[in-house]
Image: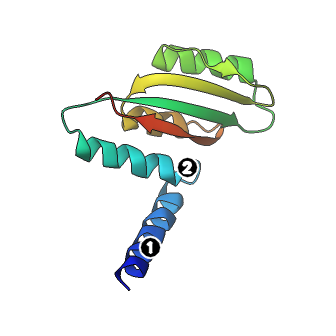
Amino acid sequence: MAANTIRRDYDGLVAALSGRHPNIDPFLLIKSAMLSRKYPEEKEQRFWIEVYLKEGVDADKKRDEIYTEIGIFGTGLGHNHFQVTLQASLDTILTLADDKDVAKIEGEVFPFS
């Protein structure tokens, strides 16, 4: 069936993205990429993300560092975990994920249209 082929292709894409970006939810990456194709005129999207820090990281200090980088304070949710809502490009999310102290980023993305 064609649907099974599509599911296998999709599973392959999820696996490939998980391998390349292990600390970012692959579904967030896929949806952001899909929205950038659907709305090519929009250079930024609305992200609602949750950032999980590695154990032992000073969460307050890291939130301050991220504020310096993106200009928005995250809302602390406790246990090295905070939430950020921002208007940004996928490159900004990838840059946040490159931080050695970030264990995981997950969340949702929306178009402006």
Residue at 38% of width from left, 80% of height from top? 5
Q: Report crowding for label 2: few under 14, some 14 to 19, many 20 or more residues within 10 A (C-alpha).
A: some
Q: Does 89 sit left or right of 11 as displayed?
A: left
Residue at 46% of width from left, 59% of height from top? 17
Q: Secondary structure at mark 1?
A: helix
Q: Which quarter shows the N terminus?
A: bottom left
Residue 6 at x, y percent in the picture: 38, 74
Q: Does 74 sit left or right of 76 as displayed?
A: left
Residue 53 at x, y percent in the picture: 70, 35
Residue 67 at x, y percent in the picture: 55, 15
Q: Which quarter shows the C terminus?
A: top left
Q: Does 65 sit left or right of 9 as displayed?
A: right
Distance from disc 2 to disc 1, alpha carbons, whole Å, reads 18 Å
Q: Report crowding for label 1: few under 14, some 14 to 19, many 20 or more residues within 10 A (C-alpha).
A: few
Say which amino acid is labelled 2.
Asp
Q: Secondary structure at mark 2?
A: loop
Is 110 or 56 nearer to us in this picture? Answer: 110
Identify the residue under disc 2. 25
Say which amino acid is labelled 1.
Arg
Numbered mark located on residue 7 in the image: 1
- 97 relative to 16, above or below: above
* Farthest residue, direction left: 41
